[in-house]
Image: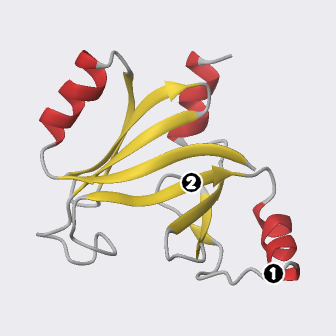
Amino acid sequence: MRFNHIALRVQNIDIMLDFYCQKLAFEEAFRIFNEDGSLRIVYVHISDGQYIELCLLGIDKPDFDDQTSLGFRHICFTVDDITKTQANLIERGVVIDSEILNMRDKNQAMYLFDPEGNKIEIVQTGIDSPQYRFQKENCL
């Protein structure tokens, strides 16, 4: 497993992008939109394969997020084979909180919680995903 991103719920995307991209000098990598065309997530590139995922707060979209509070949402790790990883984790006694899901960004993901309730996302990056394209175009 490799670290991929930490997801934060944000209230004002413009202020957050100014902070991370202008003040800290990171680069906006790509955006993910809802089915209605509204902005859902902005990925900020930190270093090779590592991001901050800025998730717009889901107050107006109760099905958007698991909570409506600001701040930490989840930490994400990338794997090469999510099915194999799932089997290995279950074999070691880890409780997986979801099936392997096909995500809107063309990745596969599953979720679990650490012993203190922090949400963890495990992702296998798809070759059609914006993450894969950004890495291929900007980090190789």
Q: Which is more toward the observer, 117 or 56?
A: 117
Where is residue 123? Give x, y as percent.
64, 56
On screen, residue 93 versus residue 29, left or right, reads right
Q: Which is more toward the observer, 91 or 33?
A: 91
Where is residue 66? Give x, y as percent.
34, 75
On screen, residue 8 versus residue 86, left or right, reads left
Q: Amino acid at mark 1?
A: Ile
Where is residue 127? Give x, y as percent.
67, 42
Q: Which residue is mark 1?
A: 90
Q: Dot 1 lies on which element? A: helix
Q: Residue sitting at 47 percent across and 48 percent down?
A: 6
Q: Residue sitting at 50 percent across and 76 percent down?
A: 117
As drawn, the label of residue 108 is none
Residue 81 position by quadrant: bottom right
Q: Residue sitting at 68 percent across and 16 percent down?
A: 140
Give the crowd class for mark 2: few <14, some 14-19, many >=20 residues within 10 Å.
many
N-terminal label among 1 and 2: 2
Q: Residue sitting at 60 percent across and 77 percent down?
A: 115
Q: Which residue is mark 2?
A: 76
Q: Which is more toward the observer, 112 or 83?
A: 112
Q: Amino acid at mark 2?
A: Cys
Residue 17 position by quadrant: top left
Where is residue 18? Give x, y as percent.
19, 25
